[in-house]
Image (cartoon, helix red, strand yellow):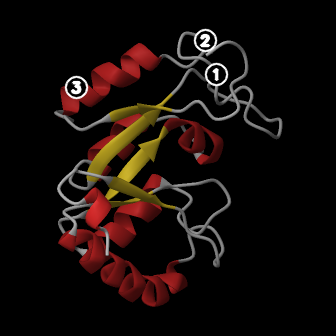
Amino acid sequence: MLQGVKARGVQFLLIFEGAKPSDTSADERAIPIICEMSDLAQEAQAFLLLYPHTGNWIERIEDAVRVADKVNRPNVGVMFNLCHWLRVSKGHDYRTRLQQALHRLMAVSINGADEYDDQPGWSRYIQPLDQGSFDILAFLKTLRDLGYKGPIDLQCYGIGGDA
């Protein structure tokens, strides 16, 4: 079924709607579906990454890890997305969150960003990599210090200008 991606190490990012953010009562309904998807992806040697997205059921990295742990499949992991984490995190202790997610962490998405923005939209949370008040170098050093060796993606959603 997924023959076009077989043995290419493809990672499918899964964003979930249909439940309130961080609602653990939805786990029971979602886990069998994710397991079924995992079986299909496994045949193609592909991976499913639970993608924390503001306003969705899996809104926080903690939600993604909780669900991935319950699914407990080697091809199901999580992605840490900087802009969504900044939007929903109460504190900015990314080291602790990354450390807690490390056993399931299969990808990280970065971008330039401001540390805090109380305005709607993404213009201050998704900026060119060399802009914003968030210390992206310290973040990358933390990933290295924790032993993370997976892919790091560049988030460019909504960034204007010359590519």
Of the two numbered discs 3 and 1 in the rendering, the one whose residue sits closer to the viewer = 1
Which residue does the numbered mark 1 point to in the structure image?
A: 127
Badge 3 density bin: few <14, some 14–19, many ≥20, Cα 10 Å: few
| Quadrant in the rendering for residue 20 | bottom right
> Residue 143's x, y, as percent?
28, 30
Nearest to the observer: residue 157 or residue 84? 157
Whether tag 3 and tag 1 are in contact, CB under 8 A, the answer is: no
The x, y position of residue 47, in whole percent, is 28, 60
Q: Which secondary structure lies at badge 3?
A: helix
Label for residue 144? 3
From the top left corner, tell me how far across and down residue 63 is, in percent. 46, 64
Task: Report the Cα–Cα distance between label 2 and label 1.
Answer: 6 Å
Amino acid type for the residue under numbered disc 1 = Gln
- In the rendered view, would you say 135 is above or below 92? above
The amino acid on which the numbered mark 3 sits, given as a three-letter code, is Arg
Residue placed under numbered mark 2 in the picture: 131
Instruction: Report whether 85 appears left or right of 69.
Output: right
The answer to the question of whether label 2 and label 1 lie on touching residues, with beta carbons closer than 8 A, is: yes
Mark 2 or mark 3: which is in front?
2
Report the quarter where the N terminus lies.
bottom left
Crowd band around label 2 with a 10 angstrom C-alpha radius: few (<14), some (14–19), many (20+): some
Q: How many marks?
A: 3
Residue 78, above or below 66: above
Image position of 55 (left or right of 4): right
Q: Amino acid at mark 2?
A: Gln
